[in-house]
């Protein structure tokens, strides 16, 4: 699901700003699971996936072109396929994981980076380069505009947010039926409309 928002609305919504900084997510999920009461629920959200992929690609291409190599300038994010597995390993059941994609338009690359700095979302990787040369930054801005620019001159910045729900086991929770105990086949779902019409006659 893709939405268009102005940068002010994104800041008002106050998206998740801590879980994506955790270095050891499996341990964090286990500790959250441990403090929950039986039948307790964990509801969380975090940035992940393709967040800021436009900025990441532009900086990498510019640095390769101007300096012959690149270092990460955007923090790594968890893939949605891994999130359910991590929650399951931590002991959560009845899992629900959903994604939301928000695209914010900015005048250019420098405004994107200024907004990220204001949000406290600058890259904190230990192996990053301490600075980017001016020529590299100007090249990255040109690449950003060329590859991702909108017709009105603005550039998009994509934020993917993962929403997750997981329950701590309790014997009162509903349990899945035994395999093979179903009395209706999924193949019969196509016939439902016809059966309903017959019932109305």
Image (cartoon, rainbow, N blue to C red):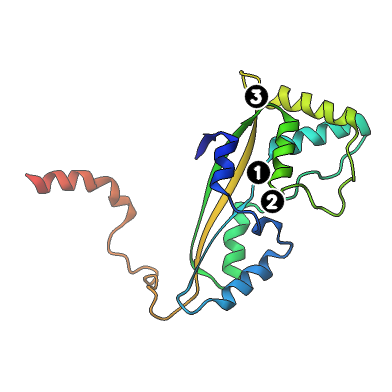
Q: Residues within 10 Å of mark 3 (few under 14, many from 20)?
A: some
Residue sitting at the far left: 201
Q: Is residue 86 visible?
A: yes
Looking at the image, residue 145 sits to the left or right of residue 185; the answer is right
Marks 1/3: CA distance?
18 Å
Along the polypeptide, which appears first: circle 2 or circle 3? Answer: 2
SS of the residue at dot 2?
A: loop
Task: Name the residue that disc number 3 marks.
Answer: 154
Q: Which mark is residue 105?
A: none
**SS for callout 1:** loop
Question: Up-down: is 144 above or below 19?
Answer: above
Distance of mark 1 from mark 2, alpha carbons? 7 Å
Where residue 72 appears, x then y in whole percent?
82, 45
Q: Position of residue 186 (x, y in %)?
A: 33, 54
Q: Under tag 3, what secondary structure?
A: loop
Q: Which residue is label 1 attached to? A: 51
Q: Are marks 1 and 2 in contact (CB under 8 Å)?
A: yes
Q: Is residue 158 left or right of residue 192?
A: right
Residue designated by label 2: 77
Q: Are marks 2 and 3 in contact (CB under 8 Å)?
A: no
| Residue at image location 28% in from the left, 51% down from the top | 188
Q: Could you tell me which quadrant the C terminus lies in?
A: top left
Q: Answer yes or no: is residue 65 visible.
A: no
Indicate which disc, 1 or 2, sits on the residue closer to the N terminus.
Answer: 1
How crowded pointer 2 is (Cα within 10 Å; few <14, some 14-19, many 20+) is rated as some
Mark 1 vs mark 3, foreground winner is: 3
**Residue pictured at 48% horizontal, 76% vertical:** 169
Residue 132 spot, x, y in % from top left = 88, 37
As displayed, is residue 32 above or below residue 198?
Answer: below
């Amino acid at each position: 699901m893709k939405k268009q928002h102005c940068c002010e609305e994104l800041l008002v919504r106050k998206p998740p700003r801590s879980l994506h900084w955790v270095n050891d997510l499996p341990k964090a999920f286990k500790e959250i699971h441990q403090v929950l009461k039986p039948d307790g629920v964990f509801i969380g959200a975090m940035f992940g996936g393709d967040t800021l992929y436009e900025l990441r690609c532009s900086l990498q291409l510019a640095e390769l072109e101007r300096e012959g190599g690149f270092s990460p300038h955007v923090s790594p994010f968890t893939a949605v396929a891994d999130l359910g597995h991590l929650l399951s390993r931590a002991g959560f059941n009845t899992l629900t994981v959903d994604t939301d994609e928000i695209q914010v338009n900015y005048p250019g690359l420098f405004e994107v980076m200024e907004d990220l700095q204001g949000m406290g979302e600058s890259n904190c990787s230990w192996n990053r380069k301490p600075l980017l040369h001016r020529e590299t930054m100007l090249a990255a801005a040109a690449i950003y505009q060329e590859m991702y620019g909108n017709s009105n001159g603005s550039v998009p910045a994509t934020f993917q947010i993962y929403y997750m729900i997981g329950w701590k086991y309790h014997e009162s929770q509903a349990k899945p039926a035994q395999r093979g105990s179903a009395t209706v086949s999924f193949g019969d779902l196509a016939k439902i409309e016809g059966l309903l019409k017959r019932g109305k006659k």
